[in-house]
Image (cartoon, rainbow, N blue to C red):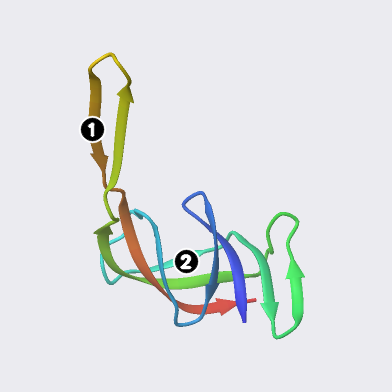
Amino acid sequence: MYAIVEIAGQQFKVEKDRKVYVHRLAAEEGANVEFDKVLLVDNEGVVSIGTPTIESAKVTAKVIAHVKADKVIIFKKKRRKTFERKNGHRQSMTQILIESIIA
């Protein structure tokens, strides 16, 4: 059984007992969170598609940790102009564990 869920503006395919990295959520570590924007549920071949969401479906998860993603290097250069700029960025992420999918 899996579901397509919208979490923090992005869509994720989630399954029970899976860990997922999402954009930073405003929840404490160890807290339980619910997501009710379920777009699709596949229950062993029986597919339910929402218009745009499924009303009775929800996904519950537990916040494991707040972490930072790998560093992304931004390098800009203009040839023959002696212009070089190097910048880095690390995105704040939240690791969650999917506990149940209620369809």
Q: Which residue is label 2 attached to?
A: 34
Most extreme residue toward the front, as rendered?
A: 80
In the rendered view, would you say 8 is above or below 34? above
- Nearer-the-camera pick, 37 or 91: 91
Q: Please indicate whether residue 27 sits to the left or right of residue 10 in the image.
A: left
Q: Please indicate whether residue 14 sits to the left or right of residue 42 in the image.
A: left
Total marks in image: 2
| Residue depicted at 75% across the width and 71% down the height | 48
The amino acid sitting under disc 2 is: Glu
| Residue depicted at 31% across the width and 36% down the height | 74
Residue count near mark 1 (Cα–Cα under 10 Å), binned few <14, some 14–19, many ≥20 = few
In the rendered view, would you say 59 is above or below 93? below
Most extreme residue toward the bottom, as rendered?
A: 44
Q: Nearer the viewer, mark 2 or mark 1?
A: 1
Quarter in which the N terminus is drawn: bottom right
Quarter in which the C terminus is drawn: bottom right
Q: Quadrant of residue 4?
A: bottom right
Q: Which residue is label 1 attached to?
A: 86
Mark closest to the chain's N terminus, 2 or 1: 2
> Label 2, label 1: how many angstroms apart (C-alpha)?
40 Å
Q: Position of residue 31 (x, y in %)?
A: 31, 69
Q: Position of residue 70 (x, y in %)?
A: 28, 55
